[in-house]
Image: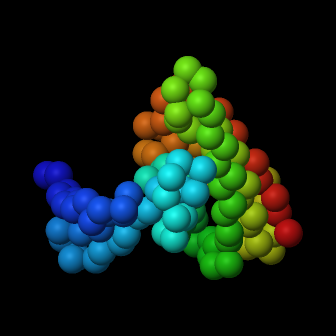
Amino acid sequence: MGVTIDATYQGGLRTTATHAPSSATLGTDAPVDNGGSGAAFSPTDLVATALGTCVLTTMGLVAERHGIDLTGMTVRVVKEMTTKPLRRIASLATEIVVPAAAVPQPEHRARLEAAAGKCPVHASLHPDIDAPLTFRYE
């Protein structure tokens, strides 16, 4: 069963999207370097956001199965664009910061790191996108 997202072009390089199951909405705006005002997430920003939140969610699923509380775990995704051969995402460098006290055992860290690399968004990225995942425990 699929999930429906409906989007409407508002003009001025802005859109509004609605998540049909929840009726939640979000707006997008083209970035300043592409003619927009940068007043909201751009469509490619949403790809970076999807990657970061997918990594956190996937790690959270594994952690819950093993009784690990990852509350406070954070992610930072740095999106870089290219214009060669066309405008697209070139890289999505992702840094995950995990509370060290939550995951004291190396085997749990390895399991969580493996899970992050298998998140559905990461697995769906085109191979031309450089998408390294780095982990810090603090």
Question: How many tags in the picture?
Answer: 0
Query: Colour mode?
Result: rainbow
Residue situated in front as seen by the camera: 18 or 37: 37
At horizontal 82% and vertical 63% (from top left) the residue drawn is 137
Left or right of residue 21, residue 120 in this image: right
**Can residue 115 be seen by looking at this rendering?**
no
Residue 105, image x, y percentages: 78, 60
At horizontal 51% and vertical 71% (from top left) the residue drawn is 39
Left or right of residue 111, residue 65 in this image: left
Residue situated in front as seen by the camera: 27 or 125: 27
Q: Which residue lies furthest to the right in this view?
A: 138
At horizontal 54% and vertical 64% (from top left) the residue drawn is 38
In the displayed structure, 72 sits above or below 110; it is below
Residue 28, image x, y percentages: 41, 64
The quadrant the C terminus occupies is bottom right
Residue 18, image x, y percentages: 24, 69
Q: Residue furthest top?
A: 85
At horizontal 62% and vertical 40% (from top left) the residue drawn is 81
Left or right of residue 111, residue 137 in this image: right
In the displayed structure, 84 sits above or below 60; it is above
To which quarter of the image does residue 114 belong?
top right
Residue 110, image x, y percentages: 70, 48
In the displayed structure, 54 sits above or below 86; it is below
